[in-house]
Image (spheres, rainbow, N blue to C red):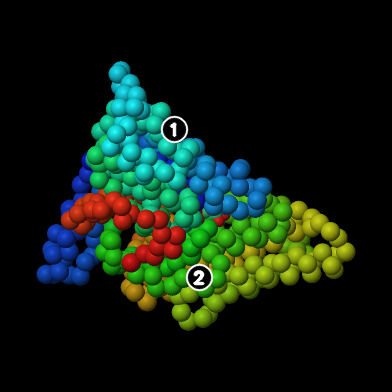
Amino acid sequence: MRILAIETSCDETAISIIYAKGAPSLDREKRKNASHKPSIKYRRPQVKILSNIVSSQIKLHAKWGGVVPNLARREHEKNLIPILKKALKEAKILKTSSKVRPWTDFQGVQGRTLEKILERETELLNQFSKEIPKIKIPKIDVIAVTSGPGLEPALWAGINFAKALAYLWNKPIIPINHMEGHIVASLLNEKNKNQNEKFIKFPIIALLVSGGHTELVLIKKWLDYKIIGETRDDAVGEAFDKVARMLDLGYPGGPKISELARKFKSEIRSADQRTKYEINLPRPMINSGDLDFSFSGLKTAVLYKIKELKKAKEIRFLDEATIATIAKEFQEAAIDVLVSKTINAAKKYKAKTIIIGGGVASNTRLRERLKEISALNSIDLILPPKELSTDNAVMIAMAAYLRIIGVKNPAIKDVSKLKADGNLRLK
Ligand code: KG4
Ligand code: ZN
């Protein structure tokens, strides 16, 4: 089946179309396992990414130092239709009608309903009325859309667009939790060593690390998620972004910090130099005995360190080597805590597999450290492809597919009840 997915929870407008088949129903799998062993493994569905379009608004938000919700919504409104056309074209299912139906064809009940659905997205409605009537109903089976968590104005743009398309094309809608998308992105990597295996072993511990979330999730079977630990203050991606700002590295900070931390290795080679630049930062809550996190103290520690160094050296700007040292030590501190809590969780719940997801999951050092520790403990590690770690719509389509094969009627029955939920939690 073909799934078209729309993702607009933050500052990326993304649309993807996937073709998915296979994998037995989760119910059957459960019943089969119930009689003998506890649920052990789950067959991987076969997925073909027909298109994956992501348009980033990073440049637009960079000058504000972070994402501005209403600016994001307006950008989504502007971008959704060009991106839809690109996605359909790439998937080779964009067909334009030779007889262009004018918008007036849609006036009357249909037109009024569309105008009602998009009443708050005037810019989108304007484009919709001009462009969508030219497109023949594409061969897709269902529309998936992110309903939360995220920035509500941004989420609404995607949701209302999905509603308008579903209405006009007569397709069902499946609402998806963005964090579930980050979890299942790990199912999309075929190059990964472990991923060539057809089966995934349960229970799984998922470490979700993004700009808004830091969570450990216990997954005993697909669609059944239990948050067993989370951050009490800042998300780890947010800490990367804030520290990057303190070091004048720009936004988003994650990739910049990881790049600089790598540079540290090549620039400061001798042990002598390393001692000269040594900086120690705390590993907050590493021995707290629970599975929660805290990154706000680490961020503040960096701030004090910067002030202290500037004062001691009587300078206004830090030199490059010092900046690289701070970046490296901050990254090490954050990763130490993430890795330690993940392995503690895996041991506690006797996990057979560790999964990571979210923007910070594209961090090379975090991936390396998790590879080491999971190998040491004989636990499978499933890493999402780097390009599918940050926000995209393929993961939303994938999550929808798991729902299609896992629950009876995953589509929302009363579309008017589909709402953006900025604080939606996994359950
Ligand atoms: O999942 P994501 O794309 O969006 C949210 O749902 O929040 O995550 C974005 C976050 C940002 O905070 C960004 O700085 C961080 O992921 N990030 C990274 C890296 N690439 C992106 N953090 C550390 N290392 C990276 N290489
Ligand atoms: Zn995300």
Q: Which mark is residue 71?
A: none
Quadrant (top left/top right/bottom left/bottom right) for the C terminus: bottom left
Q: Is residue 301 left or right of residue 125?
A: right
Side of 91 where 366 appears, left or right: right
Packing grade of label 2 (10 A; few <14, some 14-19, many >=20) is some
Q: Residues within 10 Å of mark 1 (few under 14, many from 20)?
A: some
**Residue 368, x across and y down, in percent:** 50, 57
Name the residue: 58% across, 52% down.
68
In the rendered image, residue 87, in percent from the top left (x then y), is placed at: 39, 34
Examine the rendered structure and indicate whether residue 233 appears above or below residue 406.
below
| Amino acid type at mark 2 | Thr
On the image, which quarter does residue 133 sit in?
top left
Residue at 69 percent of width and 67 percent of height: 302
Q: Secondary structure at mark 1?
A: helix
Q: Which quadrant of the rendered structure holds the N terminus?
A: top left
Disc 1 beta carbon < 8 A from ligand 1?
Answer: no
